Amino acid sequence: MKITPEDITVLIIAIILISIYLNHWLKVSQRFYTDRSIIEEYKDIPITFLCPFKDEQDNILNLLKCIKSIPNKPQWKWILINDHSTDNTMEIIKQFQGNNPKINLSILNLPNGVFGKKSAIDAGVLSANTEWIYCIDADVTIIESNIHQLMNETIKSSAKLAFGGIQYTGGSSFCESYQIIENTALLALGRYHFFNNRPSMGNAANMLFQKDYYIALKPFQGNSNVLGGDDIFFIEKSWNSDKKLYFSNNPNTAFKTKVLTKWRDLFQQRIRWAQKTKYQSTKKTQKSQILLVIFFLIYWGTIIHFMVKGLYAFSLFLLLLKTISDQYFLHRILSRSYQKIHFISIIQASLIQPFFILFIGITQIFIRGSWKGRSAPVH
């Protein structure tokens, strides 16, 4: 097949676009988890831990075991907020309370007509009697030293809202490996955005903040019915207010959490993630998502264009350029987060991700996200 000047032009443009994309992710990987210091100054600060939950019978026992493993700290209080669970989570917690009366752990039930994680956090904050509040999820594995590390880093940075790291567990299936790869990359991206003064996303499974700061900002006012987004809305309110925000870039602040095991659940999660950005006032995250979808459309459109014209070498070159580069920076990000993923899974994820993102980007326009039987609001 004869190569025309137009083909060369298209190839050059595609290489430039891919180079911009890869350079961006190279910078992300270079800035991720560069801090390995251990700070042990503040260990006796009173903290209230909030854990909203709904139907977490398969996860809550692990969290309770973590709480029990921490030496008794009278200044630490644990509030578990029940968001209308219908399984055996409550029975498991009550049994734990009976067997461990010295642990300062209480249950708070959301009243009828009040639903959702944001409402649960609101209720927990009002019940807390400490300056500092630590918000966690029911499926995390918490580590005492990492709690101290985030607290120390936050105080030294003079922040009032802080996000620790997350280490994802699982990987027995490709669905799980894919999430570990993509979620860790998003974790790194969130930190890179913060360091460049445009914070976008954190993870509310490891979130520390001051009670008075939360009450003053009212981070979930106007978006309490949105499924998810407790991190992005709090970040946005903080940054637009006084920028008393901090992202730890230290793996010694990380909690462990399990990834989803089914593609169906992952699909719904990503739909929720895509749709919650519609409710942000700045629209920065939504614009970034749109740009990413456009990039992948151009990328695969160019590859298909060359294949149709019989220029298979051009298609293969573009495919290998991105895939090999992805392998490099993703391995770098994963290793800094102590995530062990086989290189074959990284290659598979690199090939599948563009189609998955395009699918989510298009599908979320037409369907409503859901979580444990609850549907996202119509926008």
Image: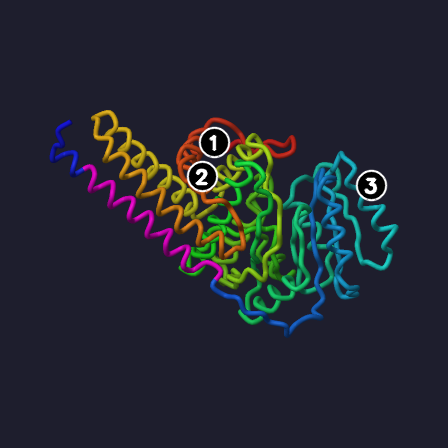
Q: Residue drawn at (58%, 62%), measured in percent from left and top?
A: 252
Tell me which residue sits at (50%, 49%) in the image.
184
Is residue 68 shown above or below 225?
below
- Circles 1 and 3, Cβ within 8 Å, touching? The answer is no
Quadrant in the picture for residue 196: bottom left
- Label 3, secondary structure: give it: helix
In whole angstroms, how far apart are the C-alphas of marks 1 and 3? 37 Å
**Residue 337, x across and y down, in percent:** 52, 55
Whichever of callouts 1 and 3 sits on the residue coming sooner in the sequence is 3
Q: Which amino acid does label 2 sit on?
A: Ala
Q: Answer with mark 2 or mark 1, whichever residue precedes in sequence.
A: 2
The magenta stretch is 10-33
Query: Is residue 166 among the parts visible in the rendering?
Result: yes
Q: Mark 1 points at which residue?
A: 364
Residue type, label 3: Glu
Q: Nearer the viewer, residue 35 or 318?
A: 318
**Residue ID at (84%, 46%):** 94
Per the image, label 2 sits on a secondary structure element best described as helix
Q: Where is residue 290 in the image (x, y as percent from the top left)?
A: 38, 39
From the viewer's perspective, is the residue at label 2 or at label 1 nearer?
A: 2
Pointer 2: what residue? Answer: 349
Q: Main secondary structure of the magenta part?
A: helix
C-alpha separation, residue under disc 2 versus residue under disc 1: 21 Å
